[in-house]
Amino acid sequence: MKSFPHALISCSMLLVAFASGEPALGADEMRLAGGDPGIEIHAVRHQARKPNGAVPVLMLHPFGAPCADAFDLPGYSWAQDLAAAGFDVWAVDMRGFARSSKPQGGSPVGRAPDAVRDVKQVVDAIKQHTGAQQVAIIAWSWGGVVAPMFAAAHPSDVNRMVLLGAMHGFVLPLMTEPFAAPDDKRRFAPARTAYQRLDATLALAHWRMMLKGREDIASPDAIAKAEALMRRCGNARTTAGKEIVVRPMGPLADLFEIWSNRPLYDASRVSTPTLVVAGDRDVFADRALAGKLPNATDLVIPDATHWVPFETKRDVLFRATREFLSR
């Protein structure tokens, strides 16, 4: 393995097993330098047995499935699907999440501009490690806010993007009202809170709301595995008889702005070819996003929610992603 001292801090090997018991492709697990002193980013690399020659792929996770493992859920692995198709796949835990550094302070940790600085360091490390001049980015939900912000700031680094359930700017009172200050509904109330602490039983409440009991969209097996993922990514711990997951408050502060129709970036500056994907039951996604980006293609998946990678229509998403990145 090549060394890149400015970025690589430590590395080990892991092997993931699917529910079938068949071994997955081997993966490198490592820590990379982040965008600020003292910040380390946990990364996982899934290498293809038969590389297809395409640029490396970087996957950025959502707030609701908060770590790199969201792309490698046993039996539902988007990362393994891409690696099997010959792509060199990288995924990270964003700042404040899971196994990456967890800075402290009196304000929401992990805002999108901080994540953009971290992604720049990760992309530079991938380029140095692989010899590639660019990367492709797959980003889900809040990750789909960070990715176009990064592409606008560093257009020469990004070959293509796939944005799933991404947001830019629209009004969603369902998600802003619970976090609005009583004296000013335009203000994010937990503005001095670094991390959100959430009852683990509520972590997938919005997915269940979108599913409305439809087992033909997501099986009990998928839901159970996703619940275990949320606990693992959120470093679940028992407090006062309740299991609590901990996530950085920064993404919620970002989403409060976005769902108050106050975008965090200028979509007209994102020139990267982009596939914008959303399930037709996804209430979080900005349905107008593809029309705001200068070089975007829109794909709406029927009978799918914000959590498509864990649902029965994931093959539509996986196939569209492979085809788009292969062009």
Image: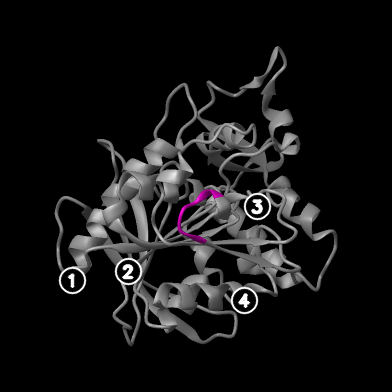
Q: In which quarter of the image is the C terminus?
A: bottom left
Secondary element at tag 3:
loop
The residue where tag 1 is placed is 1
Q: Is residue 253 above or below residue 307?
A: above
Secondary element at tag 2:
loop
The residue where tag 4 is placed is 316
* Colour setup of the view: one colour
Region of the chain picked out in magenta, as a range: 292-296
Three-letter code for the amino acid on which mark 3 is drawn: Arg
Q: What residue is shown at x 27% (from left), y 37% (from top)?
A: 38
The residue where tag 2 is placed is 56
Q: Nearer the viewer, mark 2 or mark 1?
A: 2
Three-letter code for the amino acid on which mark 4 is drawn: Val
The residue where tag 3 is placed is 287
Circles 2 and 1: CB atoms closer than 8 Å: no
Secondary element at tag 4:
helix
